[in-house]
Image (tube, rainbow, N blue to C red):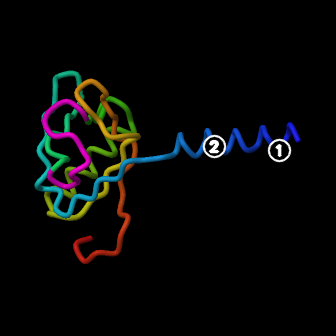
Amino acid sequence: MIKGLSVAIALLISTSALSQEWVEVEDASKLLWQMSANGTVWFRNLNEFDAKQAGCCYSYALDTTTAGGKSIWSTILAKMAAHKRITLGFPAVGTNANLQLLNYIGRHSHASNE
């Protein structure tokens, strides 16, 4: 009984930790962003792609000083240059008081603008 309860609690915790806010951007070139000297990229208009998301200015960020951040940023730049679709994943809806760091990118649909 206790083992079953422990497993249920662990599953609940892991499921909530994996929840994501997905933002589908049809044309990555329409993303507005700002980069600071410390390597942080701030995404400024995610609300234009998903009304649940906060608007400008400091709610969503990417740390480009890490290997993963550099890889993600280069992928975003390539998608911007090609005017292609991209999906951005954040842990939650951000606000200026509740910064969310980009932790996933990818393609989550089979739309024609891939």
Name the image quarter holding residue 109.
bottom left
* Up-down relation of residue 15 to residue 101 (above or below): below
Q: Is residue 52 magenta?
A: yes
**Looking at this rendering, what residue extends furthest in the bottom direction?**
112
**Looking at this rendering, what residue extends furthest in the right direction?**
1
* Up-down relation of residue 30 to residue 107 (above or below): above
Most foreground residue, 34 or 50: 50
Tell me how far mark 1 sits from mark 2, CA to CA: 12 Å
Q: Residues within 10 Å of mark 2 (few under 14, many from 20)?
A: few
Q: Is residue 53 magenta?
A: yes
Point out which mark residue 4 bears: 1
* Up-down relation of residue 82 to residue 56 (above or below): below
In the rendering, at what x and y percent does residue 61 appear? Answer: 26, 34
Instruction: Give the magenta-colored segment's residue range.
Output: 48-59
Q: Is residue 6 left or right of residue 54?
A: right
Q: Label 2, on which residue?
A: 12
Task: Name the kind of residue labelled 2 in the image.
Answer: Leu
